[in-house]
Each structure stands twice: as structure tokens, then as C-alpha cells.
Amino acid sequence: MNVLASARIAVRALRVNKMRSALTMLGIVIGVGAVITMVAVGAGAQARVAEQIQSLGANIIVIWPGTVNVSGVRLGAGAQATLSEDDAWAIQRDIPLVDVVAPYVRGNAQVVYSNLNWWTGILGITPEYFPARDWEVIEGRMLTQEEVDGASKVALVGQTVARNLFGDEDPLGQVIRIKKVPFTIIGVLDRKGQTTWGQDQDDQILIPITTARTKVLGGNQAKGRAVGSITIKVIEADLMKAAENEIRELLRQRHRLQPHQEDDFNLRNLAEVLQSQEAASRVLTILLAAIASVSLLVGGIGIMNIMLVSVTERTREIGLRMAVGARGRDILAQFLVEAVTLSLIGGAIGIGAGLLGSYAIAYFAEWRTLLQFEAILIAFGFAAGVGIFFGFYPARKAAGLNPIDALRYE
């Protein structure tokens, strides 16, 4: 008997007990669907972290003021301005591994346009800030060095600010007031989205750093050439650690810190932070897939149980077939095909359930999912493997029956 004939007999036998066959497949359906859905959820989380890495800018190191010791009193981070524009330009000049350096000052203020107002972040920047953060302008133009040198009252607005202050109106050329100081909008920034710590990067206004110091922010920010933070873009990702060490050594020299003294600045490699989050998301994906795979094993055990029951119920049929010339391998093929058919049909339905579950999570939970073709193939292949593995023992038991004993079975 060939495989095709065995398959026809197997399918006919499954159709006789439709309800039992459907319940047997249920474990495989749930298992395959769960694997596809969980992998899609995990892949979506990884993709979101990758987008956040891209939105913060590639190969970024951020420096901000650290703790200082004044007459034995330890002041908290940022209590004193320990970084300056001169530090930033020294890093740009003396460290070849650095691509671009962008010093900036930060604050918050109420911004007014016509009869509308909005509380938002204010960043005083230099033109280097745009390439350092890989930030594009979708309308208008970027800041120029002449506007920084002249402390011009010009501004670029993020998408969130533009939406809340202007709605459908074109922001370009409009005049807004920041702490009663009029600013002309020269550009609208491209969308950046949220950071991993939940900050809306589009909810801020960029103005020249000189203007921010002298006319808007004041306080520590107004002292000399002090800056609140320095963003540094390194040439290549592989050079991040080396660049970090060189920057730390240069700043310690410039700040005249003794070997026993702590750094008066904080330095963070954002790529390492975000990559660790990406690694955690990857582990979560594997964990979710492993948990979902347990359902496949449970489904396989269900197939084996049902196939054993089927062998017992059809013992006389098996004996009759052997009596008219069927060989043991024909019986083995028949029951093995039944098990594999159950798994493959369940796997196909499970793929549909997994796709539906992924879209449902994305739609109702507003959680990003990312379907992976490899996960679908692996889940379907695993379902077929489960059918072969758990169906082999019942099939072998059926093939090993003695024809005489089988015919006499009640």
C-alpha cells in the first residue's frame, strides 16, 4: 500500500470521529497560535527599542554636571554648573574619535501664541545639535551660527508644540512669546517620539543657546558659558568605549581634578543603556515563546492519547486488514499519517489564530506587534514534528499487533 492510499484511509478514519479529531487538534491550534502571537509581541518590543535608539541618535554619549564638594559639603548633581561650551569645543578639537559635539542648556517655560498657551521644554542649542541627534527639519530651516552669535530671537518647534499651539495653521513665520520674549518660528522639527523613560521629544522648542542663557532661562544657565549638558556623537559604534575613556580623561584634566577626587560630571553611553534594554526584550521574547511552546507539547500528548484509544478501538479492523495482506509498515503508515494530519491541520488553523491574535493585541491593547515569517515556519514545522514524535508510538503499537489476537479482540 502506498502513502497516498494510507493518507486516504487516515483522513476517512478522522472524519468518522469529527468531534474527537477537532478536540485533539485544539492543543496544537492553541500552541501554534500562542507561539506566533508571543513572538510577534516580543519582536514588536525589540523594534520599539530599536526605534528609540534611532530617535535618540546613533553612537551617542551624554555628559551632564555631577556632584561637587564645596568646603566639605557635597552638592547634588546639577547644583553647580561644572560644564561649559569650552569643554565641548575641547572635546571636538582634541578627540579624533568624536564626530560632532553639541552643548546645550535646558529649561521649561509657558509659551504663548495668540490666545493659546502651552507649557513645554526649552532647549538652547548650537547648530551642531541637529547632526548630533540626527534630527531633521520638515518645514523651514535649521539654526545658523550667525543666529547663535547674535543671540537672535528665532525658534524651531517640535510636533507636539506645533499641534497644541497652532493646530492646522502653518507655524512658519509666526511669533510666539517665551517668558514674554517674542520669538519668530523658522522651522518645524521632524517627529522623534518618546524616549525609553517616557519623555516626549517632540514637546520642546529649540532656540539659540546664547538667547536661552541671556533672555529666557537665567539662573545657573546664565553664568558665563555654562551648559546643562553636552551631547557627543562618536564616529563608529565600536569606538564608543574608547571615546568615553578619552572624554573622561580630558574633562578631568580640564577641571583640574586630582586622582583621589571623584568626577564632577556624569557621563553615559546611551547605546549601552538602550542595547541592554533590547537584550532584555530579546530574552523576554524567547521566554514567551518557550512558555507558549509548552502548549504544543500538551497538544502532542493529547494526540498520543487519542491515537492509543483509536488503536484499541480499531484492533479488530487492524487484524482484518492484516489477514487480507496488509503489512506492518502499512498499518504503521496509516496511523502515523493520521497523527501527522491532525498536527498539520491544527498547525494551519493555529497560524490563522496566531495572526488574528497578533492583530487583535495591536488593535485593542495598542501594543506594537511584529509578525516574523521565521516564527510561523518554525511553529508549523514544530507542529508537524509533534505529530510524528507523539504519533509514532501508537502507530508502532498498531503495526506490532498479532493478526490472530487482533481478530479475536472483543
Image (tube, helix red, strand yellow):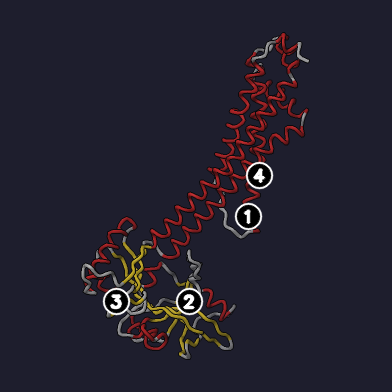
Whole-percent x, y for residue 344 in the image: 64, 34
Element type where label 4 sits in the image: helix
Question: Do labels 1 and 2 touch, CB within 8 Å?
Answer: no
- The residue carrying mark 3 is 69
Callout 3 crowding tier (Cα within 10 Å): few <14, some 14–19, many ≥20: few
Instruction: In this rendered view, identify the residue nearer to me: 168 or 29.
Output: 29
Residue that badge 4 annotates: 352
The kind of residue tagged 4 is: Gly
Q: Find residue 171 and report its horizontal and vertical position in percent.
A: 52, 80
- Mark 2 or mark 4: name the one nearer the start of the chain: 2
Q: Name which of mark 3 and mark 2 comes first in the sequence.
A: 3
Number of numbered labels in the structure image: 4
Tag 1 residue: 361
Please tell me which residue lies in front, 39 or 252. 252
Between the residue at mark 1 and the residue at mark 2, the CA separation in whole angstroms equals 32 Å
Which tag is nearer the camera, tag 1 or tag 4? 1
Nearer mark to the viewer, of 3 and 2: 3
Residue 238 in sight here: yes
Q: Secondary structure at mark 3?
A: strand
The residue tagged 2 is: 204
